[in-house]
């Protein structure tokens, strides 16, 4: 199972997508490709609102773990890291606000925002969202959706949406602890 944002798999058939595992360059020949068996979107996901923006991808075969390919633990259901906590974001998305692309996995450290500051920036934020980001030029961009926001060794968020990548301000993430029960029920762990 792969955790992602619902909007990444909304309106797409499993046969239209494959998952790549095991490399830092998605163009590399040694990546392990996986066909998709099933998409599972949260039943309350509404595409136009990007609320309940969480989904699961069931791969057609088990992933071979080892080396760089490991499972990640979900943040505890009551996890609330304080504002300013260091989080790590990663993805293959655009590298600037011109949407220039690259094939290498990139990562950055970003601070977690307080719930209050997040809500002041985006009035549509719910209890199922968190914000993280910097004062500019570091963070997620188009093509990073569905990717991880980790704090320590735990998955804390999944990239959902934001405005003006490369500009000052936060990115909005689906708050993984709010979905732990749904994730476990639907992944059959």
Image (cartoon, helix red, strand yellow):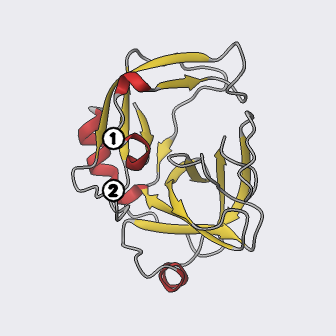
Circle 2 crowding by C-alpha within 10 Å: few under 14, some 14–19, many from 20 = few
- Identify the residue at horizontal 66%, vertical 47% (top origin): 90
Q: Which mark is drawn over residue 47?
A: 2
Q: Secondary structure at mark 1?
A: loop
Q: Position of residue 23 (x, y in %)?
A: 68, 25
The alpha-carbon separation of the residues under discs 1 and 2 comes to 10 Å
Q: Are marks 1 and 2 in contact (CB under 8 Å)?
A: yes
Out of 149 and 57, give the one closest to the viewer. 57
- Identify the residue at horizontal 29%, vertical 38% (top origin): 40
Q: Position of residue 54 (x, y in %)?
A: 37, 50
Identify residue for label 1. Answer: 11
Vertical side of 103 occupied by 144: above or below: below
Q: Earlier in the sequence, mark 1 or mark 2?
A: 1
Q: Secondary structure at mark 2?
A: loop
Q: Quadrant of the C terminus?
A: top left
User: Quadrant of residue 178 in the image?
Assistant: bottom left
């Amino acid at each position: 199972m792969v955790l992602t944002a619902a909007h990444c798999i909304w309106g797409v058939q499993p046969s239209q997508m494959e998952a790549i595992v095991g490399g830092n360059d998605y163009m590399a020949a040694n990546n392990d490709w996986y066909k998709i068996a099933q998409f599972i979107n949260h039943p309350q996901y509404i595409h136009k609102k990007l609320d309940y923006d969480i989904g699961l991808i069931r791969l057609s075969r088990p992933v071979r773990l080892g080396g760089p390919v490991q499972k990640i633990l979900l943040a505890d259901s009551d996890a609330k890291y304080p504002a300013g906590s260091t989080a790590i974001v990663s993805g293959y998305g655009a590298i600037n606000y011109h949407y220039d692309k690259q094939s290498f996995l990139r990562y950055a450290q970003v601070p977690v925002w307080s719930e209050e500051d997040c809500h002041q920036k985006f009035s549509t934020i719910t209890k199922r969202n968190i914000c993280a980001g910097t004062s500019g030029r570091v963070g997620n961009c188009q093509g990073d959706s569905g990717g991880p926001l980790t704090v320590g060794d735990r998955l804390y968020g999944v990239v959902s949406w934001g405005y003006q990548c490369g500009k000052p301000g936060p990115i909005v993430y689906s708050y993984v602890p709010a979905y732990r029960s749904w994730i476990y029920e639907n992944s059959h762990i």
